[in-house]
Image (cartoon, coloured by chain):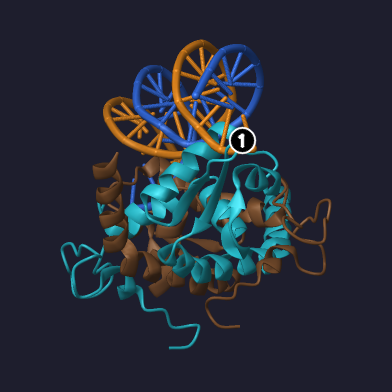
Chain colours: A cyan, B brown, C orange, D blue
DNA sequence: CAGAATCCTATGAGATACTG
DNA sequence: CAGTATCTCATAGGATTCTG
């Protein structure tokens, strides 16, 4: 399986995650149902901050404020909330050090580390393609 | 570069896309600024429908209604809007066939196809990991 | 320092009805 | 069929203030 040929059935593997619907044999022979596990997970990852936080934690544990510095425009509210969500999903772990002013450290769990590969592939693509995308936008906006 | 070692500098390659900030040499020596190209692109891909639509178009051109069938709960409004955004970003192309009831076909552009690899890697991860995530959620909710 | 609690607003997104 | 046009609502997320 190279690059041009994509196995769409990846979204609908044998054990049922793809939640197959009326299979017409060809054409749209699968669908992304609302409670499809792929969507369930992607919806969570697809928020504004999760990816950024996970990639930030890619090179080791970081403290609350360290992550905030790495992502300048995230508010403490959103940072806390996203941390909780990621922790709930088992992607990051929270460690509290009972020092004078308490310090908290966040790090990736083994599960979270497995997400790094897909994410960095995506980030690298974004990095490589942003110029082409910007040009496309300019062209589109100019044409309209 | 295997799996455990992630090159975070992917978000800040040589030509500047990572938008380096105050480089303290170690620790948080980079940051995701608001107008960082990576974020610019990720924010768009990270909406509720883009990924689903792109993966749907992975196996060939689809008509408006065909995509709608593949993603049952998307409204025409959102489908149209997301199509426009993806077209503007140069990821998909729109072709109108002037038949009696007009039919429109959407397909990936070459640029859009390059996004398929990152996306399917992510989808496959979601497919593999959703069980672990669900369990983590149950454990977390139980603990609290 | 690392949050928790409120308050408030922008916008993502559904429902419905109309059209070339 | 493939949209466009409104209307409406939920909620993601920002700003601010307070605390162990």
| Of residues D15 and B24, the one drawn nearer to the viewer in this rendering | B24
Q: Disc 1 is attached to a residue of which chain?
A: A
Place of residue A24 in the rendered image (x, y in percent of width and height, measured from the top left): 18, 70
- Residue B85 shows up from this direction: no
Is A46 displayed left or right of B75 in the figure?
right
- Residue B43 shows up from this direction: yes
Query: Which residue is at the far bottom?
Result: A1
Q: Secondary structure at mark 1?
A: loop
| Of residues A100 and A33, the one drawn nearer to the viewer in this rendering | A100
Question: Is A2 placed above or below B112 here?
Answer: below
Question: Is B7 placed above or below A82 here?
Answer: below
Q: Which residue is mark 1?
A: A100
Place of residue A62 in the rendered image (x, y in percent of width and height, measured from the top left): 61, 53
Q: Quadrant of the C terminus of chain B?
A: top left
Place of residue B27 in the rendered image (x, y in percent of width and height, measured from the top left): 72, 58
Place of residue C14 in the rendered image (x, y in percent of width and height, measured from the top left): 31, 35
Q: Residues within 10 Å of mark 1 (few under 14, many from 20)?
A: few
Residue located at (18% from left, 72% from top): A15
Residue located at (55% from left, 83% from top): B2
| Of residues B133 and B127, the one drawn nearer to the viewer in this rendering | B133
Is A17 displayed left or right of B40 in the figure?
left
């Amino acid at each position: 399986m190279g690059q041009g040929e994509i196995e769409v059935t990846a979204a609908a593997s044998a054990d049922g995650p793809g939640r197959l619907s009326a299979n017409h044999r060809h054409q749209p022979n699968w669908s992304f149902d609302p409670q499809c596990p792929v969507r369930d997970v992607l919806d969570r990852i697809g928020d504004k901050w999760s990816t950024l936080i996970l990639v930030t934690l890619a090179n080791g544990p970081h403290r609350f404020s360290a992550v905030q510095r790495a992502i300048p425009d995230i508010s403490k509210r959103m940072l806390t909330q996203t941390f909780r969500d990621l922790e709930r999903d088992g992607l990051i772990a929270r460690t509290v050090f009972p020092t004078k002013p308490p310090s908290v450290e966040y790090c990736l769990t083994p599960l979270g580390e497995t997400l790094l590969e897909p994410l960095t592939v995506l980030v690298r693509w974004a990095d490589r393609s942003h110029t082409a995308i910007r040009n496309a936008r300019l062209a589109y906006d100019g044409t309209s």
